């Protein structure tokens, strides 16, 4: 096990080293430098994490991400399952999903801010609307792979529709739902930063736009690195831990 972990760690460390090398090379170009070097960004970050301001902006952004993610999953899961199992739902709402995928995220954000107002509710709705269509189609496609014979057998034993969904359908979709959740979280936090950039006066996205207006690329990268690190921590520790716990019975999960 230790040797397997060591073999897996080597390419990851090499990848980080390559990224830092490219960053330093871009920062030290003979022409006008495009980027501050990584150590300068880390100095900025070390200074700012000692101040409450950066943590306040992080807390606001994480709250919007959580609410937008919860709203998008609450819509996508039943919607995707209905489309996967009901021909009537596919005929009635299938085109909605396709249209939603084609509409640019910027349009959803503008519509939300225009119709609801420049407030927190509009920010959460805008972020959710921008990603719910992608999550719905992922769950829809996964629902097509559910074993129909198991559903027919459950009906033969007299199980109710609710029991069939909770005991037969959802366990078969568990892996796909977990993958959609991890994918959806990555989409939502990008959309939340975009929403903050366009219409809020706080949050990580607002700070990135603020320092961009000041042409302070070092601070832009500082907030970017800080937020990406936090989201990676949530992805690996929280969602990764949930996934390992749910699927610890699988040999592949135990070896990961």
Image (tube, helix red, strand yellow):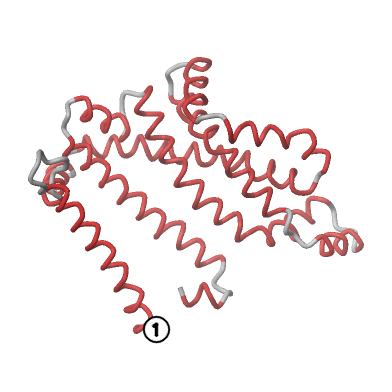
Q: Residue at x 54, y 72 (%)?
A: 248
The residue carrying pointer 1 sits among few (fewer than 14), some (14 to 19) or many (20 or more) residues within 10 Å by Cα, namely few
Looking at the image, is 77 positioned above or below residue 164?
above
Looking at the image, is 126 positioned above or below residue 71?
above
Q: Residue at x 63, y 59 (%)?
A: 174
Looking at the image, is 175 positioned above or below residue 209?
below
Q: Position of residue 104 (x, y in %)?
A: 51, 30
**Residue 151 is drawn in which quadrant?**
bottom right
Q: Residue at x 50, y 76 (%)?
A: 254
Q: Quadrant of the C terminus?
A: bottom left
* Left or right of residue 225, residue 46 in this image: left
Looking at the image, is 239 positioned above or below residue 255?
above
Q: State whether residue 121 appears in this view.
A: no
Q: Quadrant of the N terminus?
A: bottom left
Extreme left residue here? 30
According to the image, label 1 marks what residue? 1
Q: Position of residue 87 (x, y in %)?
A: 82, 43
As rendered, which of 34 and 148 lies closer to the eye?
Answer: 34
Q: State whether residue 209 appears in this view.
A: yes
**Residue 171 is drawn in which quadrant?**
bottom right
Q: Position of residue 238 (x, y in %)?
A: 43, 57
Q: Residue at x 13, y 48 (%)?
A: 37
Q: Find numbered disc 1 in the image and state the secondary structure of the residue it sits on.
A: loop
Q: Position of residue 81 (x, y in %)?
A: 71, 47
As rendered, which of 13 and 68 lies closer to the eye?
Answer: 13
As rendered, which of 203 and 27 lies closer to the eye?
Answer: 27
**Residue 157 is drawn in which quadrant?**
bottom right
The number of callouts visible is 1
């Amino acid at each position: 096990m230790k040797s397997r972990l060591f073999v897996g760690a080597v390419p990851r460390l090499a990848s980080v080293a390559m990224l830092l090398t490219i960053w330093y090379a871009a920062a030290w170009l003979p022409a006008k430098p495009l980027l501050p070097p990584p150590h300068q960004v880390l100095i900025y970050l070390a200074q700012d994490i000692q101040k409450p301001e950066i943590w306040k902006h992080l807390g606001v952004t994480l709250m919007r991400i959580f609410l937008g993610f919860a709203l998008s999953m609450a819509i996508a899961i039943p919607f995707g399952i209905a489309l996967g199992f009901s021909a009537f739902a596919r005929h009635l709402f299938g085109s909605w999903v396709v249209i939603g995928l084609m509409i640019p995220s910027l349009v959803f954000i503008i519509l939300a801010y225009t119709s609801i107002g420049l407030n927190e509710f509009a920010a959460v709705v805008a972020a959710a609307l921008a990603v719910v269509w992608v999550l719905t189609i992922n769950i829809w496609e996964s629902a097509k792979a559910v074993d129909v014979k198991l559903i027919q057998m459950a009906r033969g034993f007299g199980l109710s529709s609710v029991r069939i969904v909770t005991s037969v359908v959802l366990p078969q979709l568990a892996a796909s739902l977990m993958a959609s959740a991890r994918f959806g979280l990555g989409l939502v936090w990008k959309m939340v930063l975009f929403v903050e950039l366009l219409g809020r006066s706080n949050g990580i996205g607002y700070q990135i736009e603020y320092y961009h207006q000041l042409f302070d690329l070092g601070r832009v990268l500082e907030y970017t690195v800080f937020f990406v690190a936090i989201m990676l921590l949530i992805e690996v520790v929280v969602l990764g831990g949930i996934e390992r716990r749910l699927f610890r019975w699988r040999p592949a999960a135990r070896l990961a």
